[in-house]
Amino acid sequence: MIRILDAGPQTTVQDLGRTGQMRYGIPPSGPVDRFAFVLANRLVGNADGAAALECTLIGPRFEVTAAGAIAVTGADMPVTVNGQRAAGWTTVALKPGDVVKLGPARTGVRSYVGVAGGLDVPLVLGSRSTYLRGRVGGVEGRALRKGDELRVFPSGPGKARRVEQRSIPDYTGEPTIRAVLGPQADRFTAEGLQALFGGRYEVLPQSDRMGSRLRGPRIAHARGHDIVSDGIALGSIQVPGDGQPIVLLVDRQSTGGYTKVATICSSDIWRVGQARPGQSLRFHPIDVDEAHRLLREADRALDAAVREEIA
Amino acid sequence: MRFLPAGDLAVCVELGEEISVEVNTRVRALEFLIQQKGLTGVVETVPAYSSLLVYYDPRAVGYEPLCAAIAELVPQATTAVLPPARTVELPCCYEDPELGFDLTAAAKRLELSIDELVRLHAGAEYLVYFIGFTPGLPYMTGMPERINIPRLDTPRTKTPPGSVGIGGIQCCIYSVESPGGFWILGRTPVPLYDPSASEPTLLRPGDRVRFRRIDRAEFDTIGAAVAARAYRPVIA
């Protein structure tokens, strides 16, 4: 069991998300940074979709009541076990009574705590993911609080694993995010598209799991910013009348009535979720085939990232 | 018909650009056919007014083959393939200004008596085009033209769940507390979204909705039954 001593500002239970509920208005949820989330699970020998913690900007402090293992990936939050520094992106063995603390993120926004066996919270509509606005999943549909106790599924004997240094992403700087034009690129002027793919867009503090709000050169519409409402895909860049983009993430509204100029490819979307307020992004257009090639590349990179330590 | 890429995991199949029962029926029929045929690689589908967003797994199917497979189904996507629609009866209290807080103003704007407006609104049958925006929120039309009203000039920041509103040709029922620009005529005590239920959302795309006019006493009685988990919505 894991006992939460301090929860941090927004720590939630997530798995890989809900499927098939968007037609009822319920978004998939799941981790904002799927790449780091899957690695946290693989480091502790879990299936990719086991439930783990997503921590936002400042991590939690928690006590484990049984021997086990965890792994912390994603945003660079300093990890300590009983006050002693522990490494991120690697398996950390724990004994009963150990207290783990994740400090404020030095880079990135979201870190993941994979727990050997996976967190045992109830399945809601087929998933353990927390959807905060809809108050479902995870622990009572909410972020964790001090005093929460999370059960853990049994796990086999642990192996020590680590993510290769070269596979650990750099969350600093000004990442270039690749995006596929559309679905409503034809509703924008050529200058508007040039602005999107030539300019620099700053992440605003109002960003959350629903979407990242950005500020930069105006993305001008050719004819009206309203459309007949349609479904919104992960990573769609919605542009309301003020010409400022909002990138829609895992807790997004299932449908909406604003034009979407482009959609960030799935292998890059985590970069948006790990960019801190004040950090800037650039966008680069690619076509669907190229995006699929990048996804296969990202799958291979994920498979190549984890090494078993030789004792 | 247009196929619009929505990133690398979804494609928007656009069957029209207008809000009409005819186009929306084809959208829902196409969704039904895709589910029924179990098209390779399709992960989930989201119908809207005139388009269907199809999520897919590019590891299982390429963009072009998926679009070709969908295009093949489009000609068959008609009312004939859809299963019979459900009709959901929703009790609605119009009479209490605390619940239907825009009723008087809307009646004045439409130059109707309050009773006439309620009669016109409650007498119609509504079609749920799709569910979206917030969990369980239906996008519906079906009102008589006489009560088409422009949306509020200044949207309110909070609308209580269950609020039944009108704006333009649309009728909407808020499923959770949210901002909104509709004129609120009344409120239903039946939750459209209940996160603690095994099926949290009440309405589905394609449902027909009828409102049954109730007084405040019945509103409170049904509300208490809902709270005690003793209320069953009337679905035919």
Image (tube, rainbow, N blue to C red):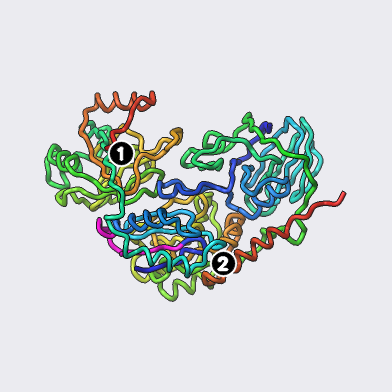
Q: Is residue B23 left or right of residue B197?
A: left
- Which quadrant is the N terminus of chain A positioned in? top right
Q: Is residue A200 left or right of residue B114?
A: right
Query: Who is closer to the viewer here, B157 or A287?
Result: A287
Let me know if residue B224 is in the magenta part. Answer: no
Residue tagged by mark 2?
A292
Residue found at x 55% / y 43%: A129
Which is closer to the viewer, label 2 or label 1?
A: 2
Q: Residues within 10 Å of mark 2 (few under 14, many from 20)?
A: many
Q: Residues within 10 Å of mark 1 (few under 14, many from 20)?
A: many
Query: Who is closer to the viewer here, A266 or B106?
Result: A266
Q: What segment is highlighted magenta in the picture?
A: B11-23
- Circle 1 chain: B
- Is residue A256 positioned above or below A282 on the image? above
Estimate the x, y position of residue B31 in percent, counting from the top left: 38, 56
Residue tagged by mark 1?
B163
Amino acid type at image mark 1: Ser
Q: CA distance from mark 2 to mark 1?
A: 43 Å
Amino acid type at image mark 2: His
Query: Who is closer to the viewer here, A156 or A247?
Result: A156
> In terms of secondary structure, where does tag 1 sit?
strand
> In terms of secondary structure, where does tag 2 sit?
helix
